[in-house]
Amino acid sequence: MNATEQTLDPARTAVLVMDFQPGILANLPDPETALARAAAAIEIARGSGATVGYVRVAFTPEDLEGLPETSGMGARVAGAGLRLDVASPQTAVHERLAPVDGDIVVRKTRVGAFSTTDLAERLSARGVDTIVLAGISTSGVVLSTVRDAYDRDYRVLVLADASADPKAEVHEFLTNEIFRRQAEVITVEELAGLLGG
């Protein structure tokens, strides 16, 4: 049975919007499309009563000091400057997708959404066992989170049209060939049907 033949229990589902922040959206050739589709997914989730969660990546000076010299992440972050500084507006959730009271918001210091956050605990406290992912970029946060979430026994769905990558061909390859091994790949329109909208 494929995803579009099933329904999701909103009480056990979270739509996670990952790395939709100005400094990362700037890497996309068309950030407006991704923003509009992520906004639509959030509206669907809220309308159904599903949890909405936000994952952002940002570093404090202490985070950077704690990275070993061998860290490839450390070198990338150092080269990014304010785009990844915790105090910069470049690392805030984009204003068009702003969180509201009751949403989950976590800050990470690695590529995936789970390893440096309390996201799993916060989802568990709400009884969430199904996550729907939208993220920038497909080859970064989405790929890492799909793999980690699958290993953590979540039911994982990826919103292909609410995720994007600086390289369109990479996005297409991951959503069509790789993610389907561990996740269901759907569209925002299909999400509405799955959540009873």
Image (cartoon, rainbow, N blue to C red):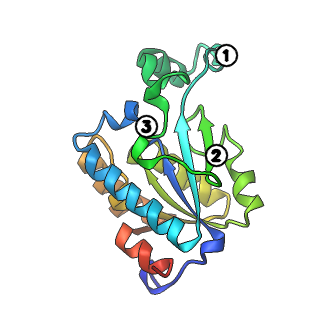
Q: Looking at the picture, does residue 146 appear above or below residue 139?
A: below
Q: Name the residue at 73% across, 63% down.
A: 126
Residue 138 % position (x, y):
39, 48
Q: Name the residue at 58% across, 53% down.
A: 53
Residue, disc 3: 21
Q: Looking at the picture, does residue 5 appear above or below residue 111?
A: below
Circles 1 and 3, Cβ within 8 Å, touching? The answer is: no
In which image quadrant can residue 81 be found? Answer: top left
Residue, disc 2: 114
Left or right of residue 97, residue 106 in this image: right
Q: Kindly identify the amino acid type of the residue bearing the numbered disc 3.
A: Gln
Near-viewer residue (101 or 126): 101
Q: Kindly identify the amino acid type of the residue bearing the numbered disc 2.
A: Phe
Q: How far apart are marks 3 and 2 (CA)?
A: 18 Å
Residue 102 % position (x, y):
65, 55
Mark sitting earlier along the chain (2/1): 1
Task: Give the residue furthest to the front.
Answer: 101
Left or right of residue 135, residue 102 in this image: right
Mark sitting earlier along the chain (1/3): 3
Left or right of residue 28, residue 186 in this image: right
Q: Residues within 10 Å of mark 2 (few under 14, many from 20)?
A: many
Q: How far apart are marks 2 and 1 (CA)?
A: 20 Å
Residue, disc 1: 62
Residue 187 in sight: no
Q: Is mark 3 on a helix, strand or loop?
A: loop
Q: Name the residue at 52% across, 25% down.
A: 73
Q: Looking at the picture, does residue 36 appear above or below residue 186?
A: above
Q: Nearer the viewer, mark 3 or mark 2?
A: 3
Residue 60 % position (x, y):
61, 20
